[in-house]
Image: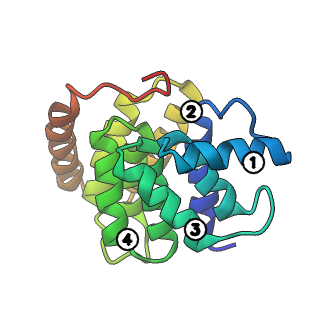
Amino acid sequence: MNTRCLFFAFAVLAASGALAAPADTSCTPEAVASLEARAAKGESRAQYWLGIQLELGVCGTKDHGRANSLLQQSAAQNFPPAVHVLGVMLRRDGKDSEAIKQFEQSAQLGFQAGFADLGFTYGLRDSPVRDAVLSYAWLTVAIARETKAPLREYLESSRAKVARALSESEIAKAQSVAEGLREKFSSIPVWSDSQ
């Protein structure tokens, strides 16, 4: 499995775990019909979940086109997990510049994974947007906003790997950029599913 596919799988799981599932996520005909009906009514959460199911083929055949359409509809309503997953899909497809825009939007909506994925995307070795200073800076912001110890430790480990490739002056620059980003996002609360 290549790095981009691995990132996609991890990000979908993280985004899915970041919010409560609909009342019934089973693949029974009734549950699927209910999710379809709510998505058709424009409910952003239902559009997101149905899009994820179709993207991954959870309740049947994969339908990437319809999944993308549903996720786009959910994202148009500023549902942070949908905005973020669209970025993950773009990164998976090698469209890192476009993915960065989605991750920035999800971060502006307070979605924690957006901050982390900005750091990860800028840190990809084969990426045209590779920038170790920005990778370090975004990971620093993600660490500062993360409340779950295991995730914070993973982010710290990732940032330490990036730091090994930076000079002292580059680390100082990254810390300065991180401080500016922390200030920029300080008034944005961490998104939670209860909002």
Callouts 3 and 2 close, C-beta under 8 Å: no
Callouts 2 and 1 close, C-beta under 8 Å: no
Label 4 vs 3, first from the N-terminus: 3
- How far across and how far down the image is residue 44, in percent? 47, 43
Viewer-proximal residue, 103 or 129? Answer: 103
The amino acid on which the numbered mark 3 sits, given as a three-letter code, is Arg
Q: What residue would you read off at disc 1?
A: 32
Q: What residue would you read off at disc 4?
A: 96
4 vs 1, front mark? 1
Q: What residue would you read off at disc 3?
A: 66
Residue 173, visible in the rendered structure: yes
Q: Is residue 53 left or right of residue 170?
A: right
The amino acid on which the numbered mark 4 sits, given as a three-letter code, is Asp
Callouts 2 and 4 close, C-beta under 8 Å: no
Label 4: few (<14), some or many (≥20) within 10 Å?
Answer: many
The amino acid on which the numbered mark 2 sits, given as a three-letter code, is Leu
Viewer-proximal residue, 15 or 139? Answer: 15
User: Between marks 4 and 3, how big is the CA–CA gap?
Assistant: 22 Å
- Give the residue displayed 33% in from the left and 55% down from the top: 135
Location of the C terminus (image quadrant): top left
4 vs 3, front mark? 3
Q: Can you tell which mark lies on residue 19?
A: 2
The amino acid on which the numbered mark 1 sits, given as a three-letter code, is Val
Label 2 vs 1, first from the N-terminus: 2
User: Between marks 2 and 4, how big is the CA–CA gap?
Assistant: 25 Å
